[in-house]
Image (cartoon, rainbow, N blue to C red):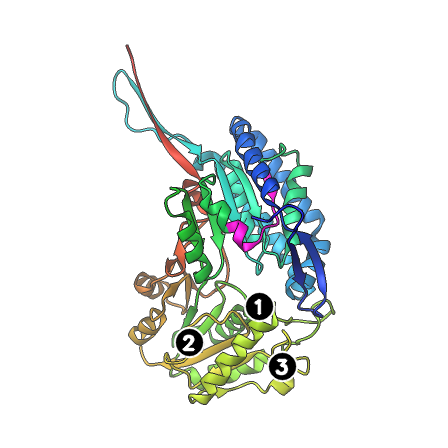
């Protein structure tokens, strides 16, 4: 870990203008050890706190975020480039998820009681696992963090939060929110950590559960680091999420929502739409309407009123998307958007024009490798069977969406899809009443819903026999 007297500085370089927006000193080995010790001791006391008191504190923390919505929106715009007009919505999502998990905590954590047997009292009690290490990403810094923080605290765990260095202010808001709500010292701590120190904490054997959201390679490093510690690990590692527009789809609804699903947050959503398959009878009309709607975006400084598309988080992220587009075009794809329609777009910057590609196929990176930027490929299909085959042709499996007016058929097709969530006539949304999970290289584990409490608790059986 960091040597005393040689601090490591973590910087958030804003995609808005390339300036250093925030910098913080990374924790050194001594402070990390103290934080872990405090977290583990504080958890023992927190576990004894009533569920009603835990709920009261969590609700007050949610209210803190709501009171800071405008401030947080501006900070998120500076830190990751999301237009300020949209950034405040993340607080609304945090509140929705947190309040749902608070509301279902009592029944989710209730004892499981089997059938009665004479002379015996038998039940299964869900106890906290201990200390939960939440390693959160930058793209939805509040939403991804709250998925584990609130249920972990409601279940009686302590939490160490490692926010991305790109969004340090979001980690600080969690610490302030719960401190102002009266959470006992040490139960939730926000740590500024290097990647190396993050891995060392995972390897230490002192974490009881690790929640990580990020890339597949980073998730593999976390899983390797946790090997042999017997800590639980939840990994949400992104997606290459597909949509299928059937012949019977509500055309206008599909166009509108699939544009938003692909380009909201500049395409930097784990469950954003990255590839679309359209029934051949609708294909030409769909592409025409889709492209016209994309052209209505305004790419500009995300702090300016009227901006609907901000820069991606880093120039390197923009360069990856540019490379995917160039390679696809070189292999025969057609780019439907003239970048000249977006004057703010420029090479060697995070400002990237949106792009829609046709003439694509699954030999192209843009249809198989996660883009995480404002680009989408659209392919025609002749049948449901062809669509399902193409939708499943991925090593990732987070969500998939079906656009149809036949709910029974959507359910039948959904059973064939290899993903964690099947949507019909919507995309890019987390319902906190439903489990958030994935298959294949998207990872493992289950967040939100009653099942989200299961991974953050340890079942203990009580078998009490009369003398």
Which of the two residues, 18 or 365, is positioned nearer the viewer here?
18
The residue to which callout 3 is attached is 347
> In the drawing, what numbered circle is on residue 367?
2
Tell me residue 359's x, y (percent).
42, 86
N-terminal label among 1 and 2? 1
Q: Nearer the viewer, mark 1 or mark 3?
A: 3
Cα separation, mark 1 vs mark 3, equals 21 Å
Residue 92 relative to residue 449: left or right: right
Cα separation, mark 1 vs mark 2, equals 19 Å
N-terminal label among 1 and 3? 1
N-terminal label among 3 and 2? 3
Write down the quadrant of residue 108 in the picture: top left
**Magenta segment boundaries in residue numbering:** 188-198
Q: Nearer the viewer, mark 3 or mark 2?
A: 3
| Label 3–label 2 contact, CB within 8 A | no
Tell me residue 289's x, y (percent).
52, 82
Residue 206 counted in the magenta span: no
Cα separation, mark 3 vs mark 2, equals 23 Å
């Amino acid at each position: 870990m960091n040597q005393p007297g040689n601090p490591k500085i973590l910087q958030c370089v804003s995609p808005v203008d390339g300036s250093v927006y925030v910098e913080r000193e990374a924790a050194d080995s001594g402070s990390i050890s103290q934080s872990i010790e405090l977290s583990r001791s504080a958890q023992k006391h927190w576990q004894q706190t009533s569920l009603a008191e835990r709920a009261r504190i969590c609700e007050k923390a949610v209210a803190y975020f709501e009171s800071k919505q405008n401030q947080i929106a501006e900070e998120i715009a500076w830190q990751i480039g999301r237009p300020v007009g949209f950034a405040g919505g993340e607080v609304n999502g945090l509140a929705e998820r947190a309040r749902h998990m608070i509301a279902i905590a009592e029944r989710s954590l209730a004892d499981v009681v089997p059938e009665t047997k004479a002379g015996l009292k038998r039940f299964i009690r869900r106890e906290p696992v201990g200390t939960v290490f939440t390693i959160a990403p930058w793209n939805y810094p509040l939403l991804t963090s709250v998925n584990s923080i609130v249920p972990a605290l409601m279940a009686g765990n302590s939490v160490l939060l490692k926010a991305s260095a790109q969004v340090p202010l979001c980690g600080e808001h969690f610490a302030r929110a719960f401190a102002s709500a009266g959470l006992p010292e040490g139960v939730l701590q926000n740590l500024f950590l290097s990647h190396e120190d993050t891995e060392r904490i995972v390897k230490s054997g002192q974490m009881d559960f690790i929640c990580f959201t990020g890339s597949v390679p980073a998730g593999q490093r976390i899983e390797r680091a946790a090997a042999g510690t017997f800590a639980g690990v939840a990994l949400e590692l992104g997606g290459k999420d597909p949509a299928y527009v059937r012949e019977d789809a509500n055309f206008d609804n599909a166009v509108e929502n699939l544009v938003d699903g692909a380009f909201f947050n500049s395409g930097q959503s784990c469950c954003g739409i990255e590839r679309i398959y359209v029934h051949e009878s609708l294909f030409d009309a769909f592409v025409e309407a889709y492209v016209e709607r994309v052209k209505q975006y305004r790419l500009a400084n995300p702090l300016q009123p009227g901006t609907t598309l901000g820069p991606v988080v880093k120039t390197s992220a923009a360069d990856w998307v540019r490379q995917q587009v160039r390679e696809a075009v070189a292999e025969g794809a057609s780019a439907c958007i003239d970048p000249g329609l977006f004057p703010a777009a420029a090479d060697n910057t995070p400002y990237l024009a949106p792009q829609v590609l046709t003439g694509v196929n699954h030999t192209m990176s843009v249809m198989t490798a996660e883009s995480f930027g404002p680009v989408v490929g659209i392919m025609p299909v002749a049948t449901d069977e062809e669509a399902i085959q193409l939708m499943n042709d991925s090593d990732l499996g987070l969500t998939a969406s079906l656009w149809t007016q036949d709910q029974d058929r959507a359910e039948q097709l959904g059973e064939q899809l290899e993903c964690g969530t099947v949507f019909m006539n919507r995309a890019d949304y987390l319902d906190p009443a439903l489990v958030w999970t994935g298959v294949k290289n998207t990872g493992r584990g289950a967040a939100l819903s009653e099942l989200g409490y299961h991974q953050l608790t340890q079942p203990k059986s009580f078998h009490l026999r009369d003398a």
